Image: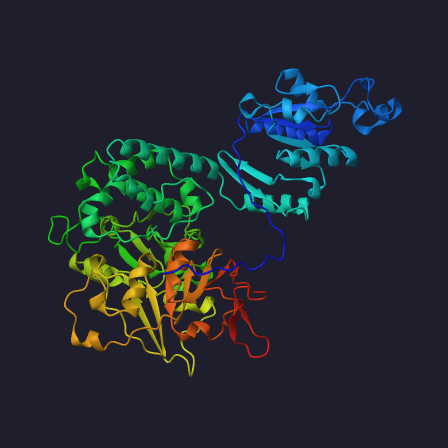
Amino acid sequence: MASPNLQTAPSAYHTTLLTAQDCREHVHLIIGSNPLAASRVFQSLSVGAKPILIAPVSAPSPPPTGSDVPPTVEANSPQNQKRELHHSLANYIASGALTHLDRPFADEDVLTLGRPEVDSVVDAVFVTEHDQTLAERISALCKRKRIPVNVLDNPALCSFSLLSVHVDGPLQIGVTTNGRGCKLASRIRREVASALPKGLGAACARLGDVRRRIITEDAEARTAAESAIAAAVNEGVDDSIDQSATFNKLVTELDVQAEAAKTRRMRWLAQVCEYWPLKKLVEITDDDVESILQAYPGFSGDSSSASPQPVSPGTASEGGNSTTSNGRKGRIFLAGSGPGHPDLLTRATYKAIQSADLILADKLVPSGVLDMIPRRTPVSIARKFPGNADRAQEELLEQALEGVRAGKTVLRLKQGDPFIYGRGGEEVAFFREHGLGDRVVVLPGITSSLSAPLFAGIPATQRDVSDQVLICTGTGKKGKPPVPPEFVGSRTVVFLMALHRIGGLVKELTTRLEEVDGFGEVSEGEKQRALWPLDTPCAVIERATCPDQRVIRTTLRYVEQAIEQEGSRPPGLLVVGRACEVLYTPKKDGQPWVVEDGQFRDLDFEDSLGLSLDADSGVAHTSSA
């Protein structure tokens, strides 16, 4: 497919490219002797740079012979005036951490005081004095020589600016208002930092160590051809890149037996970092990491030990006795946690969360819901990643059996509704086979297949537009593509578990199956199946009702390309049909897709930015509509 000429809508404000620079051994020139200069020295030292302070603190020297500047003017210039060093600067100089040049700035300083490996050019210049003439001179010089320069309170003279930064170990979070209110940036930074769980920086360091360990241990056995597999599990370290479109790429049974097993541990780590709540990541200990790495061995490990063996009916430990010696009977609740926002939890599920003795949660259950779990309650999150879903499911089922036989109230917490592509029916059947059918209670949840379109401003049904809704899976059992639904103009179709194979799904919807790989003999009905037009409106809805909800509005023609370019933000679903444009009018500016990011804020019913009520009609609608 030819790449469209994507147009970028002009921004209402000028923004900057935020980067993180490795400044170790860099030379930073700092002009000034005030408290800000001391702060710049501290920042420079903290990142491993070598600051050089230029500030005259002794009597001004006479002008050089032949100077065009009159002696009285030179001596009275602001930069030549004697100043007192800030006490922190004096301490840095005394300790040897800071080099001080007791003289005015000279133009040749930027070209002679730097590192030899970069021809003695300095790496950055910080002007901290309120001297407009000097600032303009240094700024022009640095910009001409392409040397980064920062000038106090003068964005027009700066080629870069410093952010208000929160530091926690290897974790750094920076905030900038691009010169429109530095104090506000500081407050925003404090608010963001206060919302993070304590110890998150240490968790980043620990998981980073795990990643390096996995790469080191597995790289020895990885051939050149197999190294391409690593790209599919996003082994990169570039923080500016979201999860790729292949993050949840389908792994077939053949893959599990062959090449996919070689990246099992890295896929597990990537899924943990994406899905687990931050509070749960902070709680991971070195012992937890070690047990996980042993449970999911790399190349050298025995794949047969990758997970506990499934519990089969008829074993010695089986039987319907779920009563302990003290007479307490165990119970199992299968509950749906809704699409994501904790306010959309049913009261029944909330009560189950508060009363459970053990909670076994799917990895997609959002942090807002997990935060409701009492701290005293043990929680186990499914260790699911592509190619390991069945094994992880077996682990949870075994834990559930052990819990109920010990007389505990066990809660199997799922996202959405447990009976809408949640494997809830399979789990009920499993417990019945083990004689526990009368101990199982199923609690419904709000399914994302209907609520996600609502929060994206898409009415699944609308008179004269859509009179039927079809909920489908984009991936069949064992990874086989399901039979695609035929095109019906008045139908809205919601595809779950489809974005990881969006290209194949679009091809199946718009092309005869005999032209698509993976299908056998074509039936007579398939030959008559109505195909979906490529210009059919559709929407990708990711992390619905969560603060980072994202909606990509496009058509079937461009949806694959949109996902590849915008990246993945799982979990997500695809809505197809004319209903996608009932409350949304596409812009006629040639853009093949539109991304709406961060428009859902919260369910504050007095002043809602996610779901609001019309003052006249009382009809619920979304702000994106």
In the displayed structure image, the side of residue 189 where residue 473 appears, left or right: left
- Count the marks: 0
Residue drawn at x 48%, y 69% is 457
x, y percentage for residue 387?
A: 25, 49
Query: 287 or 165: nearer the eye?
Result: 165
| Residue 279 appearing in the image | yes
Is 173 above or below relative to 420? above
- Image-quadrant location for residue 273: top left
Dividing the image into 4 quarters, which one contains the N terminus?
Answer: bottom left
Residue 96 lies, in percent from the top left, at 62, 16
Front position in the image: 158 or 220: 158
Q: Quadrant of residue 438?
A: bottom left
- Residue 20 percent across, percent down from the top left: 53, 38
Residue occupying the far right of the picture: 72
Q: Position of residue 555 (x, y in %)?
A: 40, 68
State the residue in front, 102 or 306. 102
Q: Looking at the image, is 516 positioned above or below residue 357?
A: below
Left or right relative to 283: residue 125: right
Q: State whether residue 307 appears in this view.
A: no
In the rendered image, the residue lying farthest to the bottom is 464
The residue lying toward the viewer, choosing from 176 and 560, is 560
- 272 on left or right of 516: right
Which colour scheme appears in the figure? rainbow
The residue positioned 32% from the left and 34% from the top of the image is 215
